[in-house]
Image (cartoon, grey):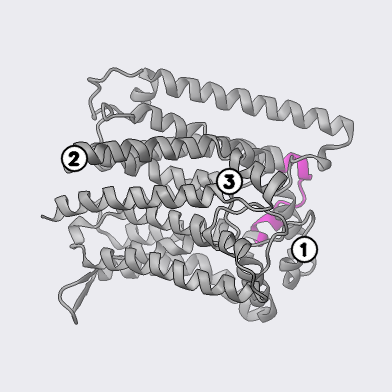
């Protein structure tokens, strides 16, 4: 373990060199990466690689790129292995650039980049924590970084050929930039707009982060203060990234229906879900499940979003806790989005981890609430490690997972109560 007397002045590289656990985490990632490549080579020569979990998601991206070249209006009909293309069209256009490269070669390049992004995630969790004043001697600091580094969901994402690590990294950089209060230029906020646009291109549900990127503050019941420079910068950067998608949907209006359908209405038959939405549908007989799903999304999702945003607006500009609101939005995604599943836990934990460390470092956490925070920390890590309990229930016994949605709900309540006390202490 890193010595308890460690100071906050260490750079990440200095801290990494002194950290036994992070070195173990790096070794774990390298061993897994090499093992995954050997497994890919073995199945390739067996001629069965496409029958395994290797490339299962990457094939969707690759085929979307091919379809974008031959029939761009049809990208939302892509479904090579029961998995539809659910992303913005600019992602398909980006993949189209690389379709001249053989699938497996491009897959190897992709998983290599994702392994590098995984290290980048740990780096920015460290930096975001430091910005919040977290000392490296804070309780559970080193172990929390290790769990970020070796989250089992990263392993599965690599096998599938996902791009989740890149999306997490982009969103963490956005958070880091928002917390860098010493920068107030239009260009600075323009960059954050571009980055969140890119993150949303890879994972459209990151759109829920955008309202929390522009400080709007209630002066009284009828007057509001808006950080105009930040609003313009974020809006311009985001719109620049989204412009190709806007042009695409104007050119192919039927594709917009396809995008909405695959993201909100079209269920993945038999796919695991972490959401309360799917859990309610599993228990409540209802003739029109799409209608019930939309009702739950609007009520539950609207409540969680509105509650968080009202708190954001009521907080003075110099006290806005971007990290907390990003964490609340990852809870919202997991609990409300019907097709959230266990792999999204890696996204959730990347933001929850620095927030838990910040709470450990807070003077406002009483002895009783410190015990609650310990429950939150251990509960989050156990969920990250033992998600398979819910998966087994879903795929082998019940056909749905009652464990992870309820587990997440309990963790959300714990997080909300502890962070409320920290907010009260900060603003008083």
Residues tagged 3 and 1 counted as in contact (Cβ below 8 A): no
- Say whether disc 3 or disc 2 marks the residue closer to the N-terminus: 3
Q: In the image, what residue occupies the spot 37% across and 62% down?
A: 190
Q: Is residue 30 above or below residue 182?
A: above
Residues tagged 1 and 2 counted as in contact (Cβ below 8 A): no
- Left or right of 177: which side holds 87? right
Q: CA distance from mark 1 to mark 2?
A: 57 Å
- Residue denoted by label 1: 67
Q: CA distance from mark 3 to mark 2?
A: 33 Å
Q: In the image, what residue occupies the spot 39% across and 32% down?
A: 144
Q: Quick one: which residue is furthest to the right in this view?
A: 47
- Left or right of 35: which side holds 23? left
- Say whether disc 3 or disc 1 marks the residue closer to the N-terminus: 1
Majority secondary structure in the magenta region:
helix
Q: Secondary structure at mark 2?
A: loop
State how many labels appear: 3
Residue 370 in picture, x, y percent from top left: 25, 37
In what quadrant of the picture does the N terminus appear? top left
- Residue denoted by label 3: 343
Nearest the eye: 305 or 163:
305
- Left or right of 271: which side holds 51? right
Q: CA distance from mark 3 to mark 1?
A: 27 Å
Q: Secondary structure at mark 3?
A: helix
Residue 314 in picture, x, y percent from top left: 21, 67
- Residue denoted by label 2: 366
Nearest the eye: 406 or 122:
406
Q: In the image, what residue occupies the spot 39% across and 57% down?
A: 192
Part of the protein shown in magenta: 92-106
Residue 110's image quarter? top right
Residue 369 in picture, x, y percent from top left: 24, 41
């Amino acid at each position: 373990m890193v010595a308890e007397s460690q100071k906050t002045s260490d750079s990440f590289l200095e801290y990494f060199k002194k950290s036994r656990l992070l070195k173990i985490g790096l070794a774990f990632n390298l061993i897994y990466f090499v093992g995954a490549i050997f497994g890919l080579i073995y199945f390739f020569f067996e001629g069965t690689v496409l029958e395994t979990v290797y490339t299962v998601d990457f094939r969707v991206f690759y085929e979307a790129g091919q379809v974008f070249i031959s029939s761009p209006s049809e990208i939302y009909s892509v479904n090579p292995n029961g998995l539809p293309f659910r992303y913005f069209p600019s992602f398909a256009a980006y993949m189209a650039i690389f379709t001249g490269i053989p699938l497996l070669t491009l897959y190897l390049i992709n998983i290599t980049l994702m392994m590098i992004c995984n290290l980048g995630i740990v780096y920015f969790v460290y930096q975001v924590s430091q910005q919040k004043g977290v000392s490296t001697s804070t309780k559970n600091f080193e172990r929390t970084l290790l769990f970020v580094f070796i989250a089992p969901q990263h392993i599965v994402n690599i096998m599938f050929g996902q791009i989740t690590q890149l999306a997490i990294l982009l969103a963490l950089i956005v958070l880091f930039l928002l917390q860098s209060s010493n920068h107030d230029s239009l260009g600075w906020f323009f960059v954050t707009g571009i980055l969140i646009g890119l993150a949303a291109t890879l994972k459209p549900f990151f759109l829920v982060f955008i309202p929390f990127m522009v400080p709007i503050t209630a002066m009284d019941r009828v007057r509001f203060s808006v950080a105009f420079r930040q609003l313009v910068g974020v809006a311009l950067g985001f719109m620049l990234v989204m412009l190709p998608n806007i042009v695409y949907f104007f050119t192919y209006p039927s594709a917009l229906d396809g995008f909405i359908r695959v993201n909100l209405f079209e269920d993945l038959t038999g796919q695991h879900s972490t959401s309360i939405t799917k859990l309610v549908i599993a228990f409540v007989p209802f003739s029109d499940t799409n209608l019930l799903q939309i009702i739950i999304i609007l009520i539950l999702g609207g409540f969680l979003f509105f509650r968080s945003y009202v708190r954001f607006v009521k907080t003075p500009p110099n006290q806005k806790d971007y990290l907390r609101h990003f964490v609340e939005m990852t809870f919202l995604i997991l609990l409300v989005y019907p097709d959230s599943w266990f792999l999204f836990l890696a996204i959730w934990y990347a933001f929850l981890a620095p927030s838990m460390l910040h709470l450990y470092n807070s003077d406002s956490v009483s002895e009783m609430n410190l015990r609650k925070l310990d429950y939150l920390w251990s509960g989050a890590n156990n969920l990250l490690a033992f998600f398979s309990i819910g998966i087994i229930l879903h795929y082998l016994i019940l056909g749905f997972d009652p464990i992870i949605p309820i587990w997440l709900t309990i963790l959300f309540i714990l997080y909300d109560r502890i962070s409320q006390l920290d907010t009260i202490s900060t603003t008083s």
